[in-house]
Image (tube, rainbow, N blue to C red):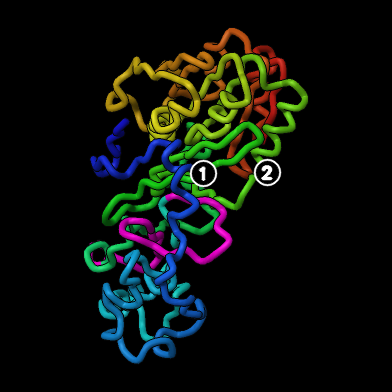
Amino acid sequence: MTIICPRCGSRDCIIPAELVFESAYMMYAACPSCMADPGVGKQTPFNRLFDSIDDIDGGTMRCHSCEKRHLDIVVAHALCILIREGLCDVQATLSHVGTPMITIGYQIPFSPRLGRDTLILIMNTVDKKTAEMIISEVPEVKGVIQRKGSLKQPIGILDTGSRPHTYNLLAGCDLRGDIVSSAFGELCIYKTQSDTHIEFSRGKSDKMQVLESLYYQRKLSGIVVDACCGAGTLGLVSVLAGAREVVLNDAFLPAVKNTILNIRANSSVLGLELEMHTDLSELPVVAGAPVLVATAHGSCDLSVYHGDLASLAAVVDQCDLCLIDAFIGVPTAGFVEAWKDTAGVVVTI
């Protein structure tokens, strides 16, 4: 099954989940011909690591067999371009480059070796011209994102009354996925990373432990509503857990688009066939009254809505469990009140 990337139109960005799971264990591994770990200190100034910016190019420390390079060398190559273009000085360290995110994220017990288009950089100090140079000159970098606001400010919307906070995609493509593990199985959750909340893959998350606890309490077998679903993780894992019906909803359109994408990318794992009911291009960025976007059938019945989560309570007749996964610091008492008559149990995460 070929899925077209909604960001760049490529047929290669989105790998069906079952194929990701088959290949992930070797995706970032060194081959027998790879050089040893270069031992580059992330806080060591560039001019103590290399004599000049001319010492690094696309071939520096590239394995002649698998053609991969160590993550630190790839980041050093990007830093070299920043120095050359006057955005950093030679005292800058690898940490100045920003946040490196591998395109399929999972907990790796070793430093990754990267092939072509396997890294997205989230950077503080970069402009569009330099971002395009990094994409052109560093083969491993798939996309360059410019961070806006503080590190603590989440990407997305806090509620339907707030303006979306997003980062700038300056060059390339920012679509990447995370392998999500649970007691019920694994999913590959894709996100357009400049407009979706960043969650690093560090093994099993606290959210997944909450979901597993609910399962062992036998609260995941009926109708489950993931009221602010983001990329769809909790709702889709609930499908794996055996829910009879799942309702996914988000007021932010990029989240709804990612949810639709993840149903498609995990369709074989989930045992679902998707049917669209609304043209996504006709929907507002932030929704009010809920609109039914899509349904899916197979292992369970699934619905996807775009709307305010409090208003959704009037659309859903009844559910056994409502999950509310809001950003930290967002008051949830009003959401719980809106769902108290509709849901058997409301859980805030």
* Above or below, 5 relative to 263: below
Q: Residue at x 67, y 15 (%)?
A: 320
Q: Is residue 62 magenta?
A: no
Magenta range is 104-133
State the image coordinates of residue 38 (x, y, percent, origin top left).
46, 79
Which residue extends farthest right?
Answer: 217
1 or 2: tag closer to the N-terminus? 1
Q: Residue at x 60, y 35 (%)?
A: 325
Residue 265 falls in image quadrant: top left
Q: Which residue has dot 1 on it?
A: 179
Figure quadrant of the C terminus: top right
| Nearer mark to the viewer, of 1 and 2 | 1
Q: Is residue 108 magenta?
A: yes
Q: Which mark is residue 115?
A: none
Query: Decide: marks 1, 2 in contact (CB < 8 A)?
Result: no
* Above or below, 148 relative to 316: below
Depth check: 110 or 177 in front? 110
Residue 260 falls in image quadrant: top left
Depth check: 294 or 140 in front? 140
Left or right of 7? Residue 32 is: right
Q: Which residue has dot 2 on it?
A: 206
* Above or below, 107 relative to 93: above
